[in-house]
Amino acid sequence: MLESDKLLLRSEDEPEKNLADAGVVKTEKETPEKKENKPDFAKVQEAVKEQALAIKQELKERKPFFSPKTAEILGTALVSMQLLLTGCGGGKPADAETKPAVADVDQETIDKLKKQLAEDFDKKWKEKEEANKSPKAAAPAAPVASAPKIVAEKPSGPSVLEMPGAASPKREWNPFPPSVSLPGVSRAEKTEEKIEKEKKDKVLVKNLQEWTGADKVEMLSDEDILITINGQGYVITPHVLKLLENENKKTESEIEGVHKTFGEMANGARAGIFRSALKKKEDIRRNEEIKVEKMEKTKVKRMRKIIKDECDKF
Amino acid sequence: MAKNTSINLKQQIADKLNLSSFSAPQQQKIISGLTENISNRINLAVFERLTEEERKELQKLAKANKKAGVLKFLNSKIDDLQSFAEQIAVETIDEFKKIREG
């Protein structure tokens, strides 16, 4: 038997089922609940409308009634109050509350806002990209020594710029890290100053050794100097150093006693045994050497006396 | 809070009117219609209670869109306004039930 014949026979017994099998109509088996609901809902709706018509009729009979605006406000106020108090009602006032806020905004507005946001984002992205392409143009180079770059590091704990948990090299506390520079002082200038000071210290050590005839002279710090004379150590403070320097600057005339001694010696030489020999240049030179030697010896004594006196004060 | 309360109230009215077998949109439609009816009924009842002068005063407050002022005014003019409104609501629902069954 052909398939079409089968359909024909079935259509006589079950026309709807057959048509559905053939894809002509759709059959839907309705549940008892659905069958019951459909007419019931219509019935309920009918009842609501019927009641509304009756109320409208009553409203017509009461003239003049509240204006539509007053009726709306009044109804909303009273119904919302009623809803909150008794739990009866729903509808318009309740709807306004249950609907989410976005429900008041139509889809067109939402789409418009979305588009606007996307455009703004694209614009900012492009600006950022352009800025990244030309960093020199975007950000002017900062002057090297315009302001001190102070990196405030605490004696303990991480720097404020260090992120917690981030790996960072272990550094010891240094009040003047290499990155710190004073205003207007370059690193080269700083090095020059250091070299200059070292030179000055060397000269000072040499002078002190010469002035005092010390066994050893060494710098204790930037200011204090340790002098060892005959195994005894003396600390030369800036004050003592100043006294020594002043003593060194004194001329012969200022050192009365010494001047007198040299004068006597010279006069004695002139007046004594070597009178004729004094005329000779060699004798004069030698005489001068003796003079300086004597003076130096006296100077050493004076210097040592100053050091001893000052140190004895303490 | 208000949203939850409102949802809860809707559920209550749905249970009272035996609307649970309907779908949510259907329930919504029925409740909206019924609430409008309750609102109109309350308006009518209030109108009946007020004098001509009081009605004019109420119109003024309503025109200014002062919902709180409207309620305050009605509370001063109608004794136990809450019970009054509740009674109207219950009567309207009962009336609706009768129409539905009939």
Image: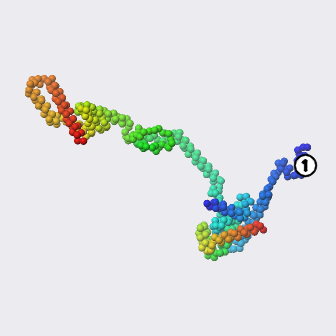
- Quarter of the image with the N terminus of chain A in it: top right
Residue A57 x, y percent position in the rendering = 72, 71
Whether residue A28 is visible, yes or no, is yes
Residue A118 versus residue A204 in the image, above or below? below
| Image coordinates for residue A90, horizontal then vertical, percent | 67, 63
Q: Position of residue B101 (x, y in %)?
A: 77, 67
In this view, A34 is above or below B64:
above
In which quadrant of the rendered image does the C terminus of chain A lie?
Answer: top left
Q: Position of residue A267 (x, y in %)?
A: 10, 29
Q: Secondary structure at mark 1?
A: helix
**Residue that appears at 71% across and 62% down:** B14
Corner quadrant of residue A52: bottom right
**Residue sitting at 55 percent across and 41 percent down?**
A129
In screen coordinates, is A257 left or right of A230? left
Write down the quadrant of residue A49 in the picture. bottom right
Name the image quarter holding residue A203.
top left
Above or below, B7 relative to A134? below
Q: Residues within 10 Å of mark 1 (few under 14, many from 20)?
A: few
Residue type (three-letter) at the residue carrying disc 1: Leu
Q: Which residue is mark 1?
A: A9
Q: Is residue A279 left or right of residue B34?
A: left
- Image label count: 1
